[in-house]
C-alpha cells in the first residue's frame, strides 16, 4: 500500500452557478447531495487526509474563469462559450492550462438560450428589434446566439444595439420595461415567463447549434491530485443519474438549494425537458466548441484554443470504469427534441404533483375544469408541435382544427400551421373548448 504523502488537509475550491440550470449536475446538485465527499479518496497516498471543500457561487461563467486564473478556484462549471474562453485564456499564458474534463448535458438544437421581451410588449419577432437595445451577458452562450440569429436571418449584427447586462440586471430591466429585449442563458427566459414579467420571442433552438455545459479544472490541480479530479467527475455522473431517475423530486430539492422555482427546473430536467443529461465529451461536442470558438475569435478577439490539449476525457473514462458503468454506451446518437412532439402534456397541481394527459386538448380541458373548481395549478406543460421543445402551456399558442389541438412556442409557428385559420392564446383556447 502506498504511503500517505499529502498534507493532512487538501482544499478544493469549486466555482458554480446556482442560477444556471444546466450546470447543476457539476455544481448545485453535487453540493446539495454531498456527492464529492462520497467519492473523495481516503486510501493509499490519501490515507488520513482531510478535505476542505469551498463552494463559490457566481452569476455567470466569466468571473469563474477570472478566479481560476487568479488561483482562487480549482474547478469551474459553465456553458459552452465561457468554457471556450476559459481554455483559450489559460493557453494564452506561457505554461498554465485548464482541462475540459466533463460535460453535464446538452440540448441538440440550442434551446435554453432565448430572447425575451417585457410580457406586454407589442414586439413578437426579431425584425422588430432592429435599431433597439438588446441586453445580454457579453461572452456568454446567449451572446453567441445573437450573432448566430443575425447571420441566419441576414440581419447585420450592427442593426441591434447590444448592451452588456448580467442575468439579474436583465430580469430587472425587462420587469421595469427599461430595455426592448434581453437575451440570456438557461433558465432566465423561462424564469421570467414563470414570474409573468417576460415573454420569449426567439428560442436558441432556431439556430440548430447544440447548447452545451460542462466543467473545467486547472492543470496544476489535475496533475497534483488526479484522483480528486476523478472523484469530482464521478460526482457529476452520479448527479446526472440522480436527476434523470426522478426529475420531479430533483426539481423540488434543487429549487430548495437555489433561487429557481421548481416548476421552471422541471421544464429543464423532466423527461422531454430542455436538458438531455449526459457527461461524455463526444466528437460532435468538440466540433460545436470549435464553432463557438470561431464566433468568439471573430467578434470578441479570443486567442487560439488547442482542443487536443484542452479536452481531457481520461478522467471520465476512469470514473466510469471505477463506478462499474459502461463508458462507450453513452456515445449513442444525441437525443433529438422532435421525439417529444407526441409526449403527454402535463399539469403540476399545487399539493398534488404532476398529472399527465393523453393530448393537448385533454390537458386544456382539465385545466379549465380545475379553474372552475378553484383548484390551484402551479404550471402547465406542452410540447411545441414543430420542434418538440417543452414549454409552459400558458405561454403557448394553439391551433384547433376538427377537434385536434396542437401547441406552438411562437405565434409565427402557430400561424404557419393554422394556414389562415385562427390561432389562440392559452386563455382563448380555454374559452374555445
Image (cartoon, grey):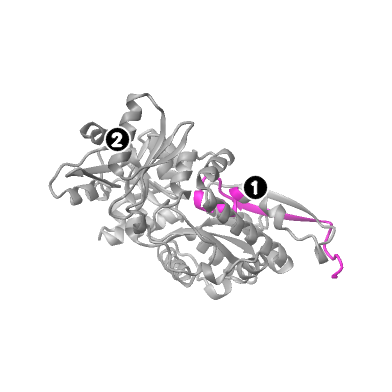
For mark 1, give the secondary structure: helix
Asked if residue 165 shows in the view, the reply is no
Which residues make up the magenta segment? 1-29
Q: Which quarter of the rendered picture does the C terminus lie within?
A: top left
Mark number, residue 365: 2
Q: Position of residue 346 (x, y in %)?
A: 39, 42
* Residue 27 is covered by the magenta coloring: yes
Asked if residue 297 shows in the view, the reply is yes
* Residue 299 is covered by the magenta coloring: no
Cα gap from disc 1 to disc 2, whole angstroms: 39 Å
- Total numbered circles: 2
Is 130 on the left or on the right of 286, as rendered?
Answer: left
Q: Position of residue 353 (x, y in %)?
A: 47, 37
What residue lies at 48% left-to-right and 60% top-to-bottom?
Answer: 80
Q: Position of residue 361 (x, y in %)?
A: 27, 41
The residue furthest left is 420
Q: Which residue is mark 1?
A: 33
For mark 2, give the secondary structure: helix
Mark number, residue 88: none
Location of residue 337 with respect to 424 vertically, above or below? below
What residue lies at 52% left-to-right and 73% top-to-bottom?
Answer: 307
The residue furthest front is 358
Find residue 356 and report its image quarter: top left
Asked if marks 1 and 2 touch (Cβ < 8 Å), the reply is no
Q: Position of residue 400 (x, y in %)?
A: 20, 43
Is 273 on the left or on the right of 371, as rendered?
Answer: right
Nearer the viewer's eye, disc 1 or disc 2? 2
Amino acid at each position: 500500500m502506498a504511503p500517505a504523502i499529502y498534507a493532512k488537509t487538501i482544499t478544493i475550491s469549486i466555482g458554480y452557478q446556482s442560477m444556471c440550470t444546466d450546470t447543476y449536475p457539476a455544481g448545485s446538485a453535487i453540493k446539495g447531495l454531498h456527492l464529492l465527499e462520497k467519492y473523495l479518496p481516503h486510501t493509499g497516498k490519501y490515507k488520513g487526509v482531510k478535505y476542505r471543500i469551498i463552494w463559490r457561487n457566481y452569476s455567470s461563467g466569466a468571473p469563474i474563469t477570472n478566479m481560476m486564473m487568479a488561483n482562487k478556484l480549482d474547478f469551474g462549471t459553465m456553458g459552452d462559450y465561457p468554457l471556450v474562453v476559459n481554455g483559450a485564456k489559460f493557453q494564452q499564458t506561457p505554461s498554465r492550462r485548464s482541462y475540459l474534463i466533463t460535460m453535464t448535458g446538452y440540448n441538440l438544437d440550442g434551446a435554453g438560450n432565448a430572447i425575451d421581451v417585457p410580457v406586454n410588449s407589442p414586439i413578437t419577432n426579431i425584425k422588430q428589434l432592429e435599431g433597439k437595445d438588446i441586453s445580454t451577458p457579453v461572452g456568454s452562450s446567449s451572446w453567441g446566439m445573437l450573432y448566430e440569429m443575425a447571420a441566419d436571418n441576414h440581419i447585420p449584427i450592427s442593426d441591434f444595439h447590444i448592451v452588456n447586462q448580467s442575468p439579474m440586471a436583465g430580469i430587472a430591466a425587462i420587469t421595469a420595461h427599461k430595455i426592448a429585449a434581453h437575451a440570456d442563458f438557461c433558465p432566465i427566459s423561462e424564469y421570467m415567463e414563470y414570474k409573468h414579467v417576460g415573454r420569449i420571442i426567439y428560442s436558441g433552438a432556431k439556430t440548430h447549434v447544440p447548447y452545451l455545459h460542462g466543467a473545467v479544472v486547472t492543470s496544476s490541480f489535475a496533475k497534483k491530485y488526479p484522483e480528486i479530479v476523478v472523484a469530482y467527475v464521478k460526482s457529476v455522473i452520479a448527479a446526472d443519474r440522480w436527476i434523470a431517475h426522478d426529475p420531479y423530486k430533483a426539481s423540488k430539492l434543487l429549487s430548495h438549494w437555489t433561487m429557481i422555482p421548481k416548476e421552471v427546473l422541471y421544464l429543464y430536467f423532466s423527461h422531454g425537458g430542455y436538458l438531455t443529461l449526459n457527461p461524455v465529451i463526444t466528437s460532435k461536442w468538440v466540433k460545436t466548441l470549435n464553432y463557438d470558438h470561431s464566433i468568439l475569435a471573430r467578434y470578441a478577439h479570443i486567442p487560439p484554443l488547442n482542443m487536443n490539449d484542452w479536452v481531457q476525457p481520461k478522467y471520465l473514462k476512469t470514473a466510469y470504469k471505477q463506478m462499474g458503468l459502461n463508458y462507450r454506451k453513452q456515445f449513442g446518437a444525441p437525443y433529438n427534441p422532435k421525439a417529444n412532439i407526441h409526449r403527454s402534456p402535463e399539469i403540476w397541481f399545487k399539493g398534488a404533483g404532476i398529472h399527465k394527459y393523453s393530448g393537448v386538448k385533454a390537458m386544456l380541458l382539465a385545466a379549465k375544469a380545475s379553474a372552475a373548481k378553484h383548484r390551484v395549478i402551479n404550471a402547465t406543460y406542452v410540447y411545441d408541435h414543430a420542434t418538440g421543445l417543452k414549454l409552459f402551456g400558458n405561454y403557448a399558442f394553439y391551433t384547433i382544427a376538427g377537434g385536434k389541438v396542437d401547441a406552438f412556442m411562437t405565434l409565427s409557428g402557430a400561424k404557419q400551421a393554422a394556414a389562415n385559420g385562427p390561432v389562440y392564446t392559452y386563455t382563448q383556447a380555454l374559452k374555445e373548448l
